Image (cartoon, coloured by chain):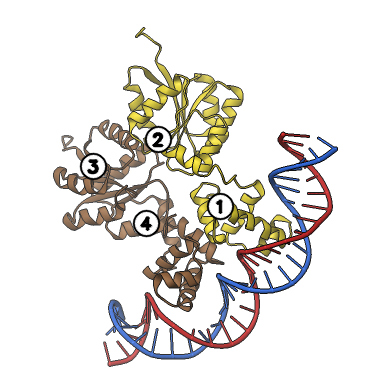
Chain colours: A brown, B yellow, C red, D blue
Amino acid sequence: MSNKQPIRVFSVDDHPLLREGIATLVNNQPDMTLVGEASTGAEATQQFRQYAPDVTLLDLRLPDMSGIDVLIAIRSEFPQARIVMLTTFEGDVEVQRALQAGARGYLLKNMPPSELLDVIRQVHAGKKRIPPEIASQLLEHMSDEGLTEREVEVLREVADGNRNREIAERLFISEETVKVHIKHIMEKLGAADRTQAVAIGVRRGIIQL
Amino acid sequence: MSNKQPIRVFSVDDHPLLREGIATLVNNQPDMTLVGEASTGAEATQQFRQYAPDVTLLDLRLPDMSGIDVLIAIRSEFPQARIVMLTTFEGDVEVQRALQAGARGYLLKNMPPSELLDVIRQVHAGKKRIPPEIASQLLEHMSDEGLTEREVEVLREVADGNRNREIAERLFISEETVKVHIKHIMEKLGAADRTQAVAIGVRRGIIQL
DNA sequence: TTTTTGCTACCACTATTTAGGTAGTCTTTG
DNA sequence: CAAAGACTACCTAAATAGTGGTAGCAAAAA
């Protein structure tokens, strides 16, 4: 039973050097082959159809679109697709959304290669694999249910240095309503003021600067 | 004259996958050899003495210390060291400090491998090499001379959601002085309020969340 | 259908921030 | 040594932000 088909791996990342590293690593494994590479979301969905990989390594941030959107696009067409999200850092909001969207694994790019190989094998075997340090982060913020769409929108305006009156004009609502939104944002994020709300929002990946 | 010694390259980065990619790429060039790798600042300075590389690729963010501090440490011992900074993103403050500290090149990690090889060869030949998109960013903010140490300190406190009174207590100065600092910070960064000052500070790499 | 959630809006009041100016001390630079 | 920059401090006044409570409406969920 040692003559199984190798795991067909597909890598999507806009860092050529990192792709090169993944390629070298994967192709050095007897039970894996890298079948394709893509550097944008558009390429990714297109090449997925072409190569039908067993496991896809998908960067969270791509030049043309969010990795999560790519994930959703691929899974809407291939619901059985096994996709592992790869990212440089740890905004827990993104993790949560990725898992809800059907990611089978989540990896930080600074992890040892053995970890990556392990996750590929586990995910290929049908399991899910999320590293404990990420999982614990998730649990930590399960309680504070996320911001609503509108609240995120307001938070973005706040981060741009707009005052409440300006935000009101830009979003076509009253200044009082803006205050209400900001109050809720601060409550949910546990922020003392709007500035810390922005800081926390960035740290958690709710908004990006 | 085709039988030159190969360029001895040394790579310092805490991302194993990226190091693997660099290693593969460099070792595939006829005129280069990778002579060593390090993943922390401590390892880096130690191994630099050991390997005496021609060109060093140094990540800006390392787990134990800033890449700039490593740069300074190495160059204080080996002033002729040719070091290229590598980073994922573009906070122009860091670039400026790295160049002032004697970096010979500055590269974003998402650049094509050919660019990396090009920079290695140019820097080895004694030239400096900064990509135009980074150089232009530098010029853009040359005018607004940077924040002072104290101002950066205050900006960090602001980002933590502290009010002026709290910042005053934490820094053992009067609330009025805090106001003055924040006023100067906003002027220098071109921010409309403290919140935007934090946002801009993060974007420029002055502070990190 | 009743309940909940999200978005909207207003009021009153307090707290905080921002803008403007002046000025002393110390260190670094020319 | 004079000049410049950095840090400190105080004052006044206006603008903005934050707190707390009430409430209507529509859509989604129970």
| Residue closer to the observer: B191 or A122 | B191
Q: Nearer the viewer, mark 4 or mark 2?
A: 4
Residue B189 is marked as 1
Say which element carries label 1: helix
Q: Is residue A25 visible?
A: yes
Say which element carries label 4: helix
Q: Which residue is mark 3?
A: A10
Q: Is residue B35 visible?
A: no
CA gap between label 2 and label 1 equals: 36 Å
Within the image, what quadrant is residue B80 found in?
top right
Are circles 3 and 4 on residues that touch, CB within 8 Å? no
Q: Is residue B159 left or right of residue B29?
A: right
| Residue closer to the observer: D8 or D5 | D5
Amino acid identity at mark 2:
Pro
Q: Is residue A104 left or right of residue A145?
A: left
Quarter of the picture containing the C terminus of chain A is bottom left
Q: Chain of mark 1?
A: B
Amino acid identity at mark 1:
Leu
Are circles 4 and 2 on residues that touch, CB within 8 Å? no
- Crowdedness of circle 1 by 10 Å Cα count: few (<14), some, many (20+)? many
Give the x, y percent position of residue B175: 71, 62
Q: Which residue is mark 4?
A: A94
